[in-house]
Image (cartoon, grey):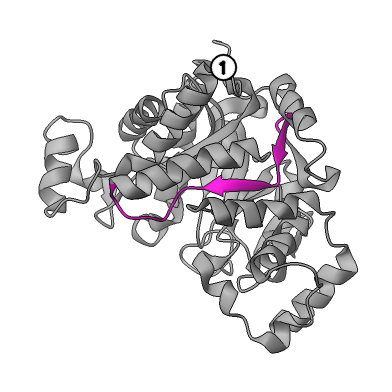
Amino acid sequence: MIPPKGATPEGTQKFQKAHKNGIHPDKWRMLKGWQVSSLGLGTYLGAYDDKTDQLLEETVGFALSRGCNFIDTAVNYRCQRSERVVGRVLKRLIESKVIQRNQVVVSTKGGFIPFDSNPVTNMEAYIRKKWFDRGIITPDDIVASCHCMHPAYLQEQIDLSLSNLGLDTIDIYYLHNPETQLPVTGEDVFYDRLTKAFSLFEENAAKGKIQCYGLATWTAFREPAAVAEHISLDRVVEAAKKAGGAGHHFQAIQLPYNMAMLEAVSISNQTLQGKSCPIFPAATAHKISVMTSAPLLQGQLLNLPSSLTRQLPNHLTLAQKALQFVVSTPGVCAAMAGMKEKEHVEENLKVLARPNWDLPTLQKICELLVK
């Protein structure tokens, strides 16, 4: 077992203490022993150009300086550009001793076919040259012309992400939208592939390349159990135990949750002690940390009707209210918010200075949203 060179409890606690005056205690969360800000920086959206790279580079550094120590990316985001930007910023800040590597939690994802800097015009030829001709995978391993869970492919993606990020260790490595495979493969093949992927992740954990792993999803944990893309958390944990035993490193999931997408609290599609329940309590029972995505639904929540927004707690902008709702929800470890402008970082991270809304407030908001 090679010790990982990533986030540590001691490093993240040091970061927390350095920002204790600007962030309310409610807004720090425990994740695998790490202290993480409950609002993380997402890096999904943006053009494939140098201008967006520069904006994101400034944003990453600014967010870290304001107490956000959780950065989420993926190898396919902006054709690998987002990972590379995160890597450049971390390298600069670590070398200048502004931060230490062990103070920052970095998560990334693999599964979708990534392009290199810009999209390609011939996807079939690109995949053939990159993977089929080299004997890494076969056409049967590709689903929907864009997704692969084969261990040999995923190993290349882990190593590529480590290179892009300039890191020795990825703190959380997610299998990206694995539910893409389910309608094509069926459950038996899917969970067999999942177990093999998890076995690879366990090997990488033993080598110190990742600290833990999980599933980053879109529909998997939001759909009713009868829907093809639904994933059973019980069966996922069973796969992790087959791959890594009782001490497996499957410790995180990610799914969308916001004021327009309430399925994580409203749809009972998992099981807990023989009864149906939503994903949040199921994850808590399995000691799985839940990260959420799309807290602003890519800006769409800024268009909520005024008849609703007037009834939300005051003294916050609409974006801040949407973020506060998500990070106050019991069961949410951290919400990943995409931000490419320093002004948005400044506005959004002000949420971290406030106490969480209490449960009656959250329940009232949910009642208003479902009317």
Question: Relative to 358, does residue 306 appear above or below in the rendering?
Answer: below
Q: Residue furthest front?
A: 343
Q: In percent of the image, x 76 and y 29: which residue is there?
A: 18
Q: In percent of the image, x 13 and y 42: which residue is there?
A: 128
Q: Which percent across, then down, holds residue 126?
A: 14, 44
Choose between 52 and 4: the one closer to the eye: 52
Does residue 71 appear to the left or right of 83 in the view shown? Answer: right
Q: Quadrant of residue 274?
A: bottom right
Q: Label 1 neighbourhood size at 10 Å, few (<14), some (14-19), many (20+)?
A: some
Q: Inspect the magenta stretch and tell me whether residue 45 lies in it.
A: yes
Choose between 234 and 334: the one closer to the eye: 334
Q: Inspect the magenta stretch and tell me whether residue 33 lies in it.
A: yes
Q: In percent of the image, x 84 and y 43: which residue is there?
A: 25
Residue 194 seen anywhere in this rendered image of the structure:
no
Amino acid tagged 1:
Pro
Question: Relative to 245, does residue 368 appear above or below in the rendering?
Answer: below
Q: Which percent across, then down, holds residue 3?
A: 58, 12
Residue 169 seen anywhere in this rendered image of the structure:
yes
Label 1, secondary structure: give it.
loop
Q: Which residue is mark 1?
A: 4
Q: In the rendered view of the protein, which quadrant contains the C terminus? A: bottom right
Q: What is the count of numbered marks?
A: 1
Bounds of the magenta segment: 31-49
Question: Relative to 173, does residue 50 appear above or below in the rendering?
Answer: below
Q: In percent of the image, x 48 and y 21: which residue is there?
A: 209
